[in-house]
Amino acid sequence: MNPRIKICGIKKPEDAFCCEELGADAIGLVFYPPSPRNVSIDQAAEIASSLPPFLTAVGLFVDPDETLVQQVLQDVRIDCLQFHGVESNDFCKQFARKWYKAIRAKSGVDLAAEAENILIHLQYWLIVLILVLQAVLAKHLFGTGCRMSSTSR
């Protein structure tokens, strides 16, 4: 399997075009109001409708309510969902889209156990594609740009 590149936090159609020019496989549209990279549904719809056919649009959510995800999926061309909160596997699978979870790699988190929980789910649903391991900084849930310690377990 070849690595794939997703550039997250896209806020304008022209930035999405730059991502494709730079060789990205996917862009991330953030639907989390506390984030400075949050986009409205209207912004996201404009960006997604202008994407070339082989650039994947990923909707990123943090502990959303079901209504928000449904509204985004109704109004925006989203190919895949990325969840960064404590959403259950049952919550994530209900939207009939490919999805994956981020695991916050911080002290005290058993990465193997977290991954195993999702992989057990995989045996039954075959929906989850990948895991994202995310370095954690205080007050930042994602997009820290920091390297994760290789000693995290």
Image: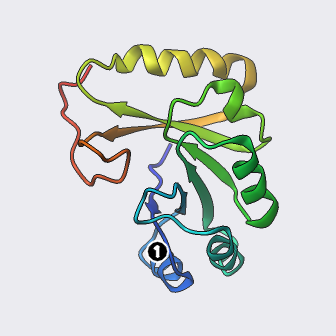
Q: Quadrant of the C terminus?
A: top left
Residue type at the position of mark 1: Cys
Disc 1 element: helix
Q: Is residue 102 above or below residue 71?
A: above
Q: Find residue 59 and report its horizontal and vertical position in percent.
A: 61, 55
Horizontal and vertical percent position of residue 135: 28, 40
Few, some or many residues within 10 Å of mark 1 (<14, 14–19, 20+) = many
Q: Is residue 112 above or below residue 100?
A: above
Residue 128 visible = yes
Q: Is residue 127 visible?
A: no
Q: Which residue is situated farthest in the bottom direction here?
A: 14
User: Left or right of 19: which side holds 104?
Assistant: left
Say left or right for 42 vs 113: right
Residue holding disc 1: 19
Q: Is residue 142 above or below residue 48?
A: above
- For residue 111, above or below residue 47: above
Residue 41: image quadrant is bottom right
Residue shown at the point (67%, 42%) measured from the top left: 65
Closest to the observer, 133 or 1? 133
What residue do we see at 56% from left, 82% from top?
Answer: 13
Residue 75 relative to residue 143: left or right: right
Q: Position of residue 150 (x, y in %)?
A: 19, 31
Q: Nearer the viewer, residue 64 or 128?
A: 64
Specify the quadrant of the image occupied by residue 107.
top left
